[in-house]
Amino acid sequence: MAASAKSFLADAGYGEQELDANSALMELDKGLRSGKLGEQCEAVVRFPRLFQKYPFPILINSAFLKLADVFRVGNNFLRLCVLKVTQQSEKHLEKILNVDEFVKRVFSVIHSNDPVARAITLRMLGSMASIIPERKNAHHSIRQSLDSHDNVEVEAAIFAAANFSAQSKDFAVGICNKISEMIQGLATPVDLKLKLIPILQHMHHDASLASSSRQLLQQLVTSYPSTKMVIVTLHTFTLLAASSLVDIPKQIQLLLQYLQNDPRKAVKRLAIQDLKLLANKTPHTWSRENIQALCESALNTPYDSLKMGMLSVLSTLSGTIAIKQYFSSAPGAAATTARSFDLVKLAQECCYHNNRGIAAHGVRILTNISASCQEKDLLPLEQDAVFGLEALLVLCSQDDSPGAQATLKIALTCMVKLVKCRPHLSQSVVESLLTQLHSAQDNARILMCHCLAAIAMQLPVLADGILGDLMDLYKLIGQSATDKKQELLVSLATVIFVSSQKALSTEIKTVIKQQLENASNGWTAYRIARQASRMGNHDMARELYQSLLTQVASEHFYFWLNSLKEFSHAEQCLTGLQEDNYSSALSCIAEALKSYHKGIASLTAASTPLNPLSFQCGFVKLRIDLLQAFSQLICTCNSLKTSPPPAIATTIAMTSGNDLQRCGRISNQACMKHSMEEFRNLATRYGDLYQSSFDADSATLRNVELQQQSCLLISHAIEALILDPESASFQEYSSNGTAHVDSEYERRMMSVFNHVLEEVESLNRKYAPVSYLASNTCLCNAVIALLKVPLSFQRYFFQKLQSTSIKLALSPSPRNPAEPIAVQNNQQLALKVEGVVQHGSKPGLFRKIQSVCLNVSSVLQSKSGQDYKIPIDNMTNEMEQRVEPHNDYFSTQFLLNFVILGTHNITVESSVIDSNGIVWKTGPKTTIFVKSLEDPYSQQVRLQQQQGQPPSQQQQQRTAYSRF
């Protein structure tokens, strides 16, 4: 368990204290000044780590200037180290403030007599092309070095020319003819030509340049038919077309022509590789004729390796818009059946091929056709896809090799996709998986269990009858303690939790616990408990967490497990709720709240400054408040029963015009109204939690959304039944039931939502106005129905797969955070906000940052001096700007007014906008203080007025001008 917890330890911040930015830079600078070459090299190679840790311009600028000095005066090995550091830190180059000085120090080496030093300098300039694309001296040096007699220098010049061509249109236009002459010149060696040709892929800055480059490449393809030349030229051709976009259809035809007519396998392989690139980048440019030609080539080729390559291109295209174009644009498409198409014939032929890879691509094509073309009658194709998948499953599940496992993953992914779009096939697919599960290898069993769980989450296809088979398999697996067996125990337990939709029986719990005691380690038990919490099996989870409490070595882990145990116990208390038994419901909720309060105390103790568990704490606090609101609502309904409204309450309501009078004393005390507002407030807080969870997976966000909808549902029911029956609308709530559901928890919650809405709507229609007794019963039953659905603790509660944070730096900034920055009240403060986006190991896994929204506001904290009549606009600063990060860095400026004398509190808050335009309140929030001081001239005038001296004429004129 200790080995598996490394990431948690890293998050928790265990480790030695690290230096601040200036100290770290000084430490490296000391190494650079050392007389020993080894220490200098060590200092140079440690710079990328420094940039990663302190990625702000002021430090990066100083560091790169020091590296440029080392490059200027050091030997070639040190220069090579600086070059590698520059290439590794390419995204930080644009933060260099003194670009001219940096380039000047580096460029001085280009005049060296040593060709190796010149070559390293050229590579250095090429690596810096993004920040100096239009430097004419660099352009000139590259052109000169292309004519050098030293091979090392020429190769470096080619590298620099390629980089500058990608960045600068002027350089690309100027160098194109030079490159063309060198490629066509008889004096240029062939190996040098092979290195020069790829430069042409960057000649896409305008149409004429791209056209001339294509003509040159066309000449080369015909003039130099050798294998290497054709391969390099064709690939450059493809990359140029992919960048310029206009010539992609021509390029697809050219590649297909080489695939069909060129007898060399190496050229055919290159053509397939480039076709795959174009299929991924621009599938919409593929015509029916292109796909047809590729199908014919695949049908006719005798080589399995080439056939697999062509099928991989077709399987890529089959998952895109190209497949619909292929079927819809066929001549007489309405009259032909799906089986008569060459693509379908090819896929059917390959489904049972003795090569696993070819068979996998065949079934993937059939699956994608079945999923994409749902308007066609594809029943025969569906059956072919299922039979092909079953055959592939039998073949790969017996083989333990990595290739077989990769093929099995493709087949299982196709199964999930097929079942999702064609639910009527689910039973046969699940049966084949369960049958094969007993005889499969352990690696295959793990993957098959994942597939079963994924299918069962979407559709309730695993009946209670199969639990016996699964338990027998579980007992069999539990006899071994290898790593694969541990993984399999977790996967199989997940399938058992998914398949048993209601509470686990005592027998199943006993078997799982026995196997865990016999053969598992603590980490396996924790993972199974975590899955039980996700699936709502809280009694099982509580017992497992309880057993793990004494097996951890850190108090943070102990408190974390203890909090999970208390939360599971709290949710277990709610499973005993029964409709129409409200006193029992109140005692169950009270018991759950007691455990939740214990759990939140443990959870707070488990948090650390670097791992504050903010989502977990926010989610649990909202759950506590929601349970308290439910309890309060039931109490209010019960008190209404003990003191019902008078018989003439309806008449009083009609005569007074206040419909709330129908509920008698309770409504006068506004309890129901307060309860409704409380649920709406909870819904708003759930919305805030949703907005702050940028890194959460979609299932976790959907869970938060369901909690929010349950709050809105109850507030709507209170309004519709008691407070304002006539204006309550059902339209906005009724459409939720038709949405696609992805889990059993969501399915049950949506079922409760729809049932409650139907009850409320039917009461409103049948018995208008609704009697207090019927409305109370309906509300209490709605609360109990919502609480009876076991809460699902989703993945983000336990595990953070994506990590994104923003680090802000403000300038000017005080040396001491408590000190204010002094500004004169007749001047504006230019506040510069810089920021860095920091990612974890999987950036952009769920969503990516499109832009950062910066909000700056100022509040007057304390006033000094007299009160003046100042326009309201000058009293506060409220500004917002959106900036797009480039290489994870952004910067912008704000001009702020501080007319009122005194101390102002400036708050800078950042939020992010993802690629879908959704705003996420990720933070951080930074605060600085500004002290607005009276300017000296105004102060002098004021003092003179206080002493009774009239200001001089000159001073009066100056005042008038300053006012103007």
Image: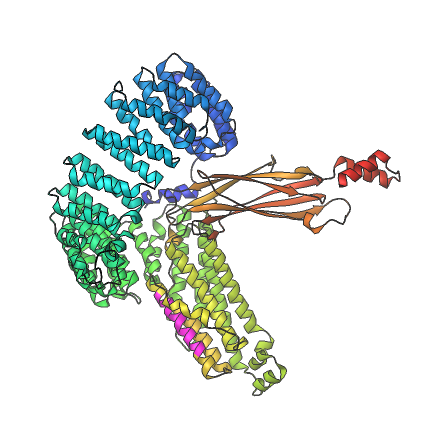
Q: Nearer the viewer, residue 23 or 157?
A: 157
Tell whether position 163 is magenta: no
Residue 434 appears in the rendering: no
Q: Nearer the viewer, residue 443 or 422?
A: 422
Q: Where is residue 209 drawn, in percent x and y?
A: 37, 33
Residue found at the very far bottom of the displayed protein: 647
Q: What range of the chain is rendered magenta?
A: 747-761
Whether residue 127 sits left or right of residue 477 in the image: it is: right
Q: Quadrant of the C terminus?
A: top right
Of helix, strand and loop, which mostly describes the magenta segment?
A: helix
Whether residue 754 sits left or right of residue 829 in the image: it is: left
Q: Where is residue 232 drawn, in percent x and y?
A: 25, 31
Q: In this picture, is 464 found above or below 219?
A: below
Whether residue 435 sits left or right of residue 580 in the image: it is: left
Tell whether position 752 is magenta: yes
Q: Quadrant of residue 415?
A: bottom left
Q: In this picture, is 76 found above or below 829?
A: above
